[in-house]
Structure formats: C-alpha cells, structure tokens
Image (cartoon, rainbow, N blue to C red):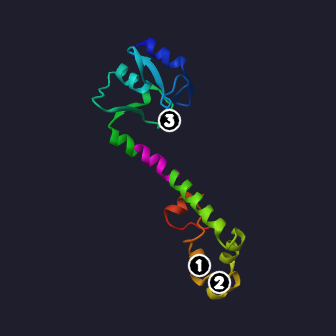
Amino acid sequence: MSPEFIARLRKRSDEVGECWEWSGAMQSTTGMPVIRYEGRAQPTRRAIAIELGLSLDGRLATCKCLNMRCVNPEHIVVVTRQQLQKRTAKSTQLHLNQARCRKLAQSARSRGKLTEAQVAEIRAIDGMKQRDIAALYGITQSTVSAIRRGAKWKDYANPFLQLIGMSKK
C-alpha cells in the first residue's frame, strides 16, 4: 500500500481504539465510507483491498470489527455477500428482536387490565390458589399461571433470560 494512500486515509479518519473511523464522504443510502479512487467514487474499503492486493473476484471488502465507519487496513477482509449477510445478521438480530419484542409488549400492556405493580404482586403472592388470585385481579387462572411462569409480562431488557425462555418482570 502506498504511503500517499495511507496518508489520505489518515487525513480523513479519526483513531478510535484500534479502528480508524472515517470522517470523510459517506454513501447517502448505506452510510458506507466513500473515497475518490481510480478516477471515481468507490467504497473506501474496496479501494483499500485493491491497494493491499487482495483479490475481490465478485466478493466484498468489509471489516473484521463490524464497525461501519472503520477503514483501518489491518481490519479489512474480503468475504462473499452470503458471508457478510450471516455476520451482519448475527450482530444485529438479537438487538432488533429485543427491540421489536419490547415494543410489542408495551403496546399489548397498554391495552391490558394489569399494571406492572400488579404483576409484581401476583408473582410475590405465596400460599394462595391461582384461581383466587385471578378472581382478585379480574383475570383468568391461566393468565396468572402464565405470568408466574414468565410466559406473559416478559422482561426484554435481559437478553440472557430471553434466550432461555425465563423472562420475568
């Protein structure tokens, strides 16, 4: 890689830990770093891969660190589109799923009969039959059972409890 090219990268990026976060032009639709290379605007990581002598052959240049703005040449790897999709899905799937579940749960709870305080009370009651608890709160026995098991009123803030199906509030 030429020293001039490295100087161009360094001039337009900020060092954040091991990453060089791009502060230059970004592609408007994807937010990917873009640089003028070989007479036209190209994805910066692609230009770096070419400078490093990596064979692209229809593959994509991305970063090991999964930082969208990183242009550190040491982090550049060449992958197939399928490999990139798998990597991206793994890193974003849990977060997006949690956010979606939290939003759906809040929506359903706003329409429900119980408040969070009542749910906490139901979980704390010992020595009383579920049927009696249900009558006390005006809900069904199966709803009381589901709340106590964690099948209803899940806590989506803790991803580990969600993974093992034991989400409780």
Q: Amino acid at mark 1?
A: Thr
- Amino acid type at circle 3 is Asn
Q: State the residue position of label 2.
A: 134
Residue 132 placement (x, y as % from top left): 66, 88
Q: Which residue is mark 3?
A: 67
Indicate the quadrant containing the N terminus: top left, top right, bottom left or bottom right: top left
Q: Which quadrant does the C terminus fall into?
A: bottom right
How many C-alpha atoms fall within 10 Å of the one at disc 2: few (<14), some, or many (≥20)? some
Rendered view: 31 above or below 34: below
Q: Marks 2 and 1: CB-CB under 8 Å?
A: yes
Disc 1 target residue:
143
How many numbered badges does the structure rendering display?
3
- Dot 3 lies on which element? loop
Q: Earlier in the sequence, mark 3 or mark 2?
A: 3
| Residue range corresponding to the magenta coloring | 87-95
Where in the figure is residue 151, as x and y percent of width and height?
A: 54, 71
**Upstream in sequence: badge 3 or badge 1:** 3
Amino acid type assigned to the residue bearing label 2 in the image:
Ala
